[in-house]
Image (spheres, grey):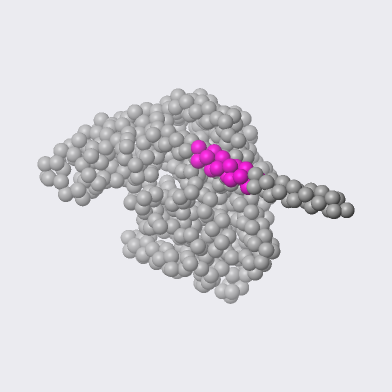
Amino acid sequence: MKIKISILLLSFLLTLWSCKQDAKESEENSTVSEEVIQEHSKNLNDWFEAQFQEDIAKSPMTQTYLGIKTDYGKWDDISSKREAKDLERAKERLAYLKDSIDVAKLNKATALSFKLMRQSLENEIEDFQYRFYNYPINQMHGMQAEIPAFMINMHRIGDKSDAEAYVSRLNGMKELFAQVVENLKIREKNGILPPKFVFAKVLDDSRNIIIGQPFDKSNKESTLLADFKRKVKKLELSEEENNELFVKAEKALLEGVKPAFENLIVLLEEQQQRATTEDGCWKFPKGNAFYNNALKRTTTTDFTADQIHELGLKEVARIHDEMRDIMKQVKYEGTLQDFFKFMKEDKKFYFANDEAGKKAYMEQAVGLIDTMKSRLNELFITKPKADIIVKAVEPFREKSAGKAFYQMGTPDGSRPGTYYANLYDMEAMPIYQMEALAYHEGIPGHHMQISIAQELQDIPKFRKYGRYTAYIEGWGLYNEFLPKEIGMYSDPYSDFGRLAMELWRACRLVVDTGIHTKKWSREEGIKYYTDNTPNAESDAIKMVERHIVMPSQATAYKVGMNKILELREDARKKLGDQFDIREFHDVVLTNGAVPLNILEELVAEWVALKNSASNEI
């Protein structure tokens, strides 16, 4: 009996010792695994950084956007040969990720970076077939206007060498625009030619750059010469140094800029004669396949054109009903269309279309931004360090530019973010839409999202500067609505303005798909906007023309906003009293721009973590 007990005791002790050894070995293996994960994650993040730096080194313009002056006097190579090289590089990078990276050995953050990079490369390779399916010269973001705007807004002059680099870029425009002209010719050979209405607008932009001194004997300096002189005079150089730089700039304008734009103008005038009034990309070879792909990239969803069209019709009807509620609040008698007419025509809703009116608009816009800054703690944990300024769109491009947009600042804060308001036509900038515009383009909209992404410390740079339109513009539109929840839009007319802005984006779903898949004409698109919104006809014309030259882009706003609201409400239901809107916004903002399906995963993880922590308590 004693022997049996001793054997049992010995067996128990051996089992206990074995369990301890297994636990010890498991702990040691776990430590090793963590080390392996950290090592592999670091190696991949180092690779991400190397690829980012390689891309930056090949793009002097991106360097300037980021405040880097390594190739400050140069332009990007935008030739078709460059695109072919970029394709090969994308294939090599994708092969490296597939063949050399074990995702199981990456930490959570790096695994997400891997997923985003792989998807981006796969899309880039797949989309190469559509590389000519765009209009490099268009009235929205064409190079005829973007390149001069780049010199004015991006090329800062802090010393004499920066001024020399400016002159170098003026000289370099001749070669840059030679590539633009070649790219336009390639596109036309492939059946990609802008519709006729585009040409008058882009020709005006192009001609505007080469009028004034030194291009003619007028008393007015040309746009770029005036910009150069204004910047150089702030350096406080000697009069001799100033004059030397001014002479160099004038020579570069005559020998670099003038032939650049003249050659472009000659081609555009020729193409104008061959252009048609067919507006949709259904006219392209494989146009329907291109548009479906464009929708997929823009919305980061699998929504079809028909689904997006129907969503737009549904949202238009809902917003019309909410507008009728506003009509009751302000005791307006009549139909919704009568109310639209009233909002369009009553002078009390508009600043005067003169310098005093434009000044008043700008002052009020700055005030809206400043007020919102003081309320951010109620909605956000993470806030941007970068400042924001408000500017009017420059005169040389205000006729063709959009009504408002945001230009990101530099990561180091040396150039603040800029909210641009287009004051060319004050009837297109009603007072009742001011709040929504400021919140969308400024704060809490694009400025917060883009600046916070740039300032993140724990993600690769390719994610800091990622561009997923549905996420970015969905966030902007969501933030037209968000301030209402903390008491903004106290004036019912301003709340109507907010709804009018949302209605505008809902109509975009209908008109974009209408033009590009249902063969709507430009005029049909304009009529849909004027029948269903209170916006000025000039607004409708610009928007339809934007749809035409930027297929699918405008569908991102409403699709993105709806997804953010859907995720927020789902999280609120699942978390109940634990839901904190500031934490929700942190989840949305502190991972950089992501596709909507990835955003859904991130929010789901946050909800699960909160619920798990609650259960443990």
In this orientation, which residue lies closer to the viewer: 266 or 444?
Answer: 444
**Residue 374 visible to an observer of this rendering:** yes
Residue at horizontal 51 percent and vertical 35 percent from the top: 134
In this orientation, which residue lies closer to the viewer: 495 or 606?
Answer: 606
Residue at horizontal 47 percent and vertical 26 percent from the top: 85
- Give the residues in magenta: 26-43
Residue 389 versus residue 349 in the image, above or below: above
User: Where is residue 579 drawn, in percent x and y?
Assistant: 62, 65
**Residue 352 visible to an observer of this rendering:** no
Residue 376 versus residue 394 in the image, above or below: below
User: Where is residue 45 drawn, in percent x and y?
Assistant: 50, 40
Residue 35 forms part of the magenta stretch: yes
Q: Quadrant of residue 32?
A: top right
Task: Give the left or right position of residue 436, taking residue 23 as reference.
Answer: left
Residue at horizontal 42 percent and vertical 30 percent from the top: 78
User: Where is residue 283 drawn, in percent x and y?
Assistant: 59, 33
Q: Quadrant of the C terminus?
A: bottom right
Task: Give the left or right position of residue 546, taking residue 575 as reference.
Answer: left
Task: Give the left or right position of residue 605, taking residue 479 as reference.
Answer: right
In this orientation, which residue lies closer to the viewer: 547 or 163?
Answer: 163
Residue at horizontal 53 percent and vertical 50 percent from the top: 591
Helix, strand or loop for the magenta stretch, by majority: helix
